[in-house]
Amino acid sequence: MSDTHDTGHIWQSLAVNVAIAVGKGVAAVVSGSGAMLAETLHSGADCGNQLLLLLGVRQAQRPADAQHPLGYGAALYFWSFMVALLLFSLGGAYSVYEGVHKFSHPEAVGDLTWPFAVLGGSLLLEGGATLGNIRTLNQRRGELPFFRYLRETKDSDLIVIFGENAAAVLGLVFALLALLAAWMTGDGRYDAIGSIAVGVVLIGVAIFLAVEVQSLLVGERADASVDVHVQAAAAEDARILSAFRLITVQKGPGEVMVAAKLELASDLDTAGVVDTINRFERRLKELAPAVRWCFVEPDVPKRGPNQEITPTAED
């Protein structure tokens, strides 16, 4: 998980998409291509999406206050979810609608020199941006398989940008193939099919992003490494016999809340209990800097016949 709000990848994608959207728009007007119009809408929607992500990052950095005592980290997840909705509606659904309309009323495409040049250049730019995203993902995922990391990462802005760029590359390939088929056959319905294909890609990516970000919005557990650090911090103190009933919640990128119960040595007085818990919390935050909030209480676990800790009604 990331402990900082790095926006470099967002600004890079925004700059690329602004340039691409302008070029695609001109090409769509010149050629009258439905696939080019779909791609223009796609790039325009991506620009708006990246502005929303930047807004989310800014809001997530606001400090905690009386109204929001656990901070505003989840604001980034909210805006990431909004991006998924816009990608679905403004990008995907409208592209499919435009494609169906063009297929029902096919029109011959005009001069395709400019569209082919724009799509080729766009593919190079989007491909470069996607490769940059993949390099960043590979640096952060460690030993995790790539697609598993996409499912488990808490950096919603990173997977949204990667999803947008990957969808853009695939959409550009479909648009190029559709225009090539329309040019070779003189049948404008191939162009309409390209628009539908672009829309289907956007809808698929939007659904994936919405599912992943929705889990974070509801309250997803933090990385498993936090559990390991809790047990490590407990094991370092001989006065702590066990840590149990552990709950971790991801409150935002690099922001984790931990709640746990500690089984303490029976000979500790009140001051000793307080000191042990305070030491445990400080050590945990040293091992896992992402832990912003730590709520710990002493308790005696109920153990079954095999001496394993078992749940109780009070837990």
Image (cartoon, helix red, strand yellow):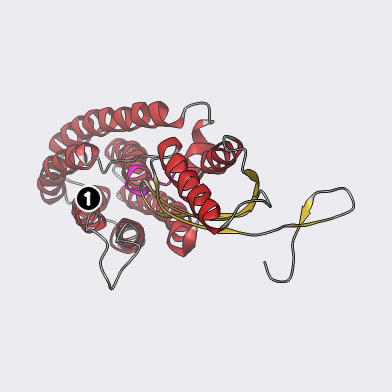
Which image quadrant is residue 180 in? top left
Name which residue type carries label 1.
Gln
The percent position of residue 152, horizontal first and vertical second, equals 50, 44
Residue found at the far right of this picture: 305
Residue placed most toward the observer, 298 or 312? 298
Q: Mark 1 points at which residue?
A: 50
| Relative image position of residue 105 (x, y in whole percent) | 30, 62
Residue 230: x percent and y percent? Answer: 55, 43
Q: Give the range drawn in magenta.
A: 153-158
For label 1, count other residues whose C-alpha is less than 10 Å away and answer few (under 14), some (14-19) or many (20+).
many
Residue 121 figure quarter:
top left
- Judged from this view, the residue extending furthest toward the bottom is 67
With respect to residue 129, does 268 lie above or below?
below
- To which quarter of the image does residue 313 belong? bottom right
Is 106 left, or right, of 250 in this rendering? left
Residue 104 visible in the picture: no
